[in-house]
Image (cartoon, rainbow, N blue to C red):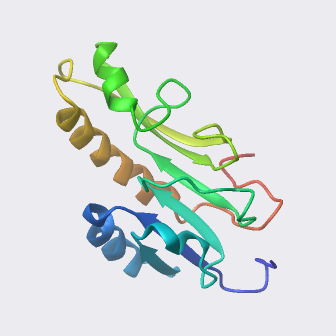
Amino acid sequence: MDYVNKKYILGVFTKDVHVSKLTNFLNKSDRNFIISTRKDDKYRNDFDIGISYCYPYIINMDLDKRIWYNYHPAPLPQYPSICCYVDAINDRVNKFGVTLHRITSKIDDGYIIAKKQFDLDSIPIDVNELGCISHYYLFQLFKETINKLNFKEGEKSNEEK
């Protein structure tokens, strides 16, 4: 796809709980976008760049050759996968973070573009507590980075250079 001469459309894939805040923020930008929470929508053809924002389904990069980015609610590479909160609580962390990375064929293993680290006032006692804190910072990272990413195929983003 030629991203230089066209206005590309972001396909943002997420959970229902995040749709409102993502939609409200993206409506204020100059981005064209669609938002979906459905499992099968990730292979639809009405978007150019894929954004996974806490999307609970795996993107099969063998089937989809578009550029995909993942907003992961934990620091990578330390806490990959959906067990990130449980693992961090078991490790009794007092610092945590969130990550933006490129999606590859391996789960949570792509090039890290940006991280946001933060101290925890106390060691979290459950996944809901850590999840709420993490999602606050993940949305901050989204707002700081979504308009800075360079989506031209084969070219690194400003953050990747």
Q: Is residue 37 above or below residue 93?
A: below
Where does the image place residue 91, in percent across and percent down from the top left? Answer: 34, 13
Camera-side residue of 65 and 132: 65
The answer to whether 144 appears left or right of 120 in the picture is right
Residue 47 rendering spot, x and y as whole percentages: 61, 80
Q: Measuring 43% from the left and 75% from the top, which residue is drawn there?
A: 35
Residue 28, visible in the rendered structure: no
* Quarter the N terminus occupies: bottom right
- State whether residue 6 is above or below residue 80: below
Residue at the image point whose x is 34% and y is 61% from the top:
15
Residue 60 in view: yes
Q: Residue placed farthest to the front in the image?
A: 40
Name the foreground residue: 85 vs 155. 85
Q: Which residue occupies the foreground of this view, 120 or 69?
A: 69
105 up-or-down from 75: above or below: below
Residue 120 image point, x, y percent: 25, 24
Q: Quadrant of the rendered structure where residue 25 is?
A: bottom left
Q: Is residue 53 left or right of residue 45?
A: left
Identity of the residue drawn at 18% across and 28% down? 126
Left or right, residue 103 beside residue 133: right
